[in-house]
Image (tube, rainbow, N blue to C red):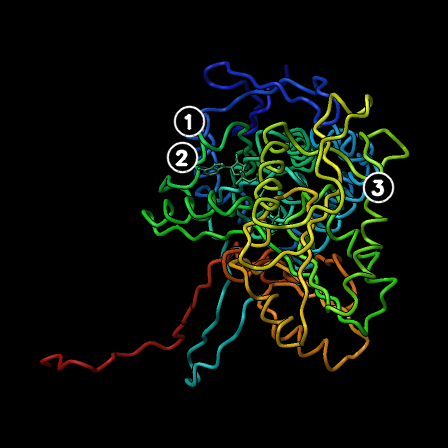
Amino acid sequence: MRSSIFIDGEWRPASDGATREIRSPADGSLIATVSEGKIDDALAAIAAARSSFDSGVFTSWGWARRSALLATVADLLERDVELIAALESGDTGKRIIESKYDVADVAATFRHFAQLASEQHDKKIDSGIPHVSSRITYDAIGVCSLIGPWNYPLLQIAWKVAPALAAGCSFILKPSELTPSTAMHLLKLLEEAGVPRGVANLVTGAGSVIGDTLTTDPRVDFVSFTGGLSTGKRIMSKAAETVKKVALELGGKNPHIIFADADLDAATDFAVTAAFLHSGQVCSAGTRLILERSIHDQVVTEIVRRAKLIRLGGPTDLTAETGPLISEGHLKKVEEYLARGVQEGAKLLVGGVRSTAPELSRGWYFPPTILDNCDTSMYCVQEESFGPIMTVEVFESEEEAIRLGNDTIYGLSGAVWSKDNAKTERVSKALRHGTVWINDYGPYKPAAEWGGFKASGNGRELGEHGLQEYLEIKHIWTNNSPSKSGWFADGI
Ligand code: NAD
């Protein structure tokens, strides 16, 4: 059993001694037994974060020293890549190679925010008065609750922890209760790098138990959340009680539009990757394939052929191309979602039933699945399955492609394929999504903002804005030669 709660510089068990078993989604084996934090633990973590922030212990470091700290954390992450990848794959079931890519992205995130911190400076304003200086400063927002999901556990929390540290904030980190191991290791690295006591706190445990405490406590200034839409809505309404700033990275139902004049070899290949990478457990998964009618049969025949070839397997299976779903509960939800799609009239072309292969029988595997004959009135087109289910729709015109691409409550990401640059430019501008790829699918850069339009959330992570979320803007006006205002008569 590992004491996985880190408060005020100390590792401790849960206040009531409760624990949780973390089991591999790939084969059910016991990965770890960790502390299951409760409300008392969340309150203690908030108190520690508040007191460290109010003491000025970290804000007094200044931007340059905090930038150097982030660069050290990036070095430590790279040093421990093998160990961290093993922990991440243990919790999520994803292949070790994918976890290693994730660790590289996590280190790149810390380096990006180290760079931004090193460039940070006040902004001078022209006061229009010779003896008055006026400037804008950027202060740490304060105490932050950082809440993450299970699909890219370390990467998603890195997008929060790195800018929080760059800004000089103190925080309480709550990873998904299903995947706490890499968050625990990150906190060890922060300790090693010299983050002051009380600045970085970690509470493992169920969101349904400690989530409200972390998002409503008046001592918390900012909540940054990545997860599902319903949880995001709850956090937003709860945070209103204390007028807390909230940043939300929620779901996506991402249109992948292919015109007949696209490079179909590349587009078809990307269609398969976009939908089935990490078994569809990706917020930006290209699960809505939207094809120009004239290429429908050709593309669908090819993606069905390719979907059948995808090999499922656990973290250390070197022949595997994608892994299991995160839990039995999630697998059941994916099955119900599929059944509803078929009931609504979608045509199941491939996949759709759990694998019976003996080597997969102890894990939560679900095969790549394609539903044809779909339209935007269907639940399976409108709602996220967060599993390996691709729906196929068709369009006749550019206008219709745009209309379909925007016919969703979500707005996280999308893609358009065509060799006609003017057309891809028009379509990319018209799509109401936070990221649009042209003749590509999936890449992101730490220097580019990430986030959603509409119900995919608010605020942005990464880029420059990803740091600004953690800053308060202050105007400082300095009169170097004060004299009476003369507004009211002084009676003299
Ligand atoms: P989830 O909403 O179930 O849980 C996310 C986190 O919220 C977990 O840590 C959970 O413990 C916590 N939580 C639960 N109830 C809470 C409450 N009342 N208050 C505060 N926190 C609470 O989501 P999930 O199943 O872990 O993740 C999958 C979802 O995340 C998908 O919808 C996916 O699209 C989304 N996601 C979005 C992005 C993005 O960048 N937009 C990235 C990854 C995942």
Give the quadrant of residue 286. bottom right
- Whether the residues at callouts 2 and 3 have beta carbons within 8 Å, the answer is no
Q: Judge depth for marks 1 and 3 and give the one in front.
A: 3
Circle 1 sits in a helix, a strand or a loop, which is it? helix
- Quadrant that contains the C terminus: bottom left
Dividing the image into four quarters, tell me where ligand 1 lies.
top right
Q: Read off the residue under disc 1.
A: 39
Circle 2 sits in a helix, a strand or a loop, which is it? helix
| Residue 398 x, y percent position in the rendering | 67, 76
| Residue 11 x, y percent position in the rendering | 58, 23
Tell me: is circle 1 under 8 Å from ligand 1: no
Give the quadrant of residue 181. top right
Circle 3 sits in a helix, a strand or a loop, which is it? loop
* Residue type highlighted by circle 3: Ile
* Residue type highlighted by circle 2: Thr
Q: Read off the residue under disc 3.
A: 310
Q: Judge depth for marks 2 and 3 and give the one in front.
A: 3
Q: Nearer the viewer, residue 87 or 260?
A: 260
Q: Residues within 10 Å of mark 1 (few under 14, many from 20)?
A: some
Give the quadrant of residue 335. top right
The alpha-carbon separation of the residues under discs 2 and 3 comes to: 43 Å
- Judged from this view, the residue extending furthest toward the left is 491
- Whether the residues at callouts 2 and 1 have beta carbons within 8 Å, the answer is yes
Q: Read off the residue under disc 2.
A: 213
- Quadrant that contains the N terminus: top right
| Mark with earlier residue (2, 1) | 1
| Mark with earlier residue (1, 3) | 1
Q: Nearer the viewer, residue 307 or 9?
A: 307
Q: Is residue 38 left or right of residue 364?
A: left
Residue placed at 79% from the left, 45% from the top? 104
